[in-house]
Image (spheres, rainbow, N blue to C red):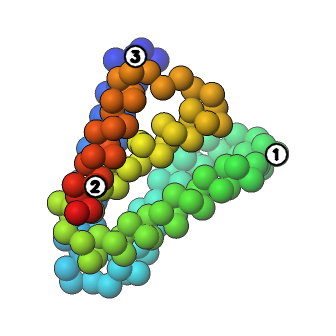
Amino acid sequence: MSNLMATGLVVLSAAMFAVGSFLGKTLLKDLPSNHVYLMEAAGTLTVALCVLFFYRKEVSLLITNFTWTGYLFGLLWGVGTVLFIIGLKYKPASIAVPLNVSLYPLIVVLLSAIFLKEVITFKAGLGIVFAIAAAFLLAW
């Protein structure tokens, strides 16, 4: 896959997360957060079932290659989604989403540098500084 195509997929995923967060906020005006989460989970389950259908020949590989890291990955995303939806219920989307989006990469970069020994470039370091500043400004 080309670098340009990979970048396009990342941008498309960011747009989907953004529109999804917006739709979640609109739902939270009329529904309790647990109902919104269950609808989000139904959408996620639909995607998971499609992946299982299209890759059904590899399901046995999934079972034999099960890892607790993979399970923890899904569990943390699920719990994170629940917490985000609850926070979104009580915080304006204009604050909750940017706060989430500014802290998310900061934490990933720091964990990657510590545990994966990835090098933090000057540009990435500058981005971390701006992410911290953004988080403080939004929380303040």
| Left/right of residue 16 with respect to residue 69 in the rendered view | left
SS of the residue at dot 2? helix
Q: Which residue is mark 1?
A: 64
- Of 36 and 107, the residue lying toward us: 107
Q: Amino acid at mark 1?
A: Thr
SS of the residue at dot 1? helix
Q: Is residue 39 visible?
A: no
The answer to which quarter of the image holds residue 136 is bottom left
Q: CA distance from mark 3 to mark 1?
A: 31 Å
Q: Amino acid at mark 2?
A: Phe
Q: Who's the residue at 54% across and 47% down the image?
A: 51
The disc at residue 136 is 2
Q: Residue placed farthest to the top in the image? A: 2
The answer to which quarter of the image holds residue 22 is bottom left
| Left/right of residue 56 with respect to residue 7 in the rendered view | right
SS of the residue at dot 3? helix
Q: Who's the residue at 51% across and 39% down the image?
A: 110
Of circles 2 and 3, the one toward us is 2
Q: Is residue 31 visible?
A: yes
Q: Earlier in the sequence, mark 1 or mark 2?
A: 1
User: Circle 1: is it few (<14), some (14-19), or many (20+) Cα within 10 Å?
Assistant: few
Against 24, residue 14 (above or below) is above
Q: Who's the residue at 76% across and 49% down the image?
A: 66
- x, y percent for residue 15: 26, 44
Against 104, residue 117 (above or below) is above
Viewport quadrant of the C terminus: bottom left
Q: Earlier in the sequence, mark 2 or mark 3?
A: 3
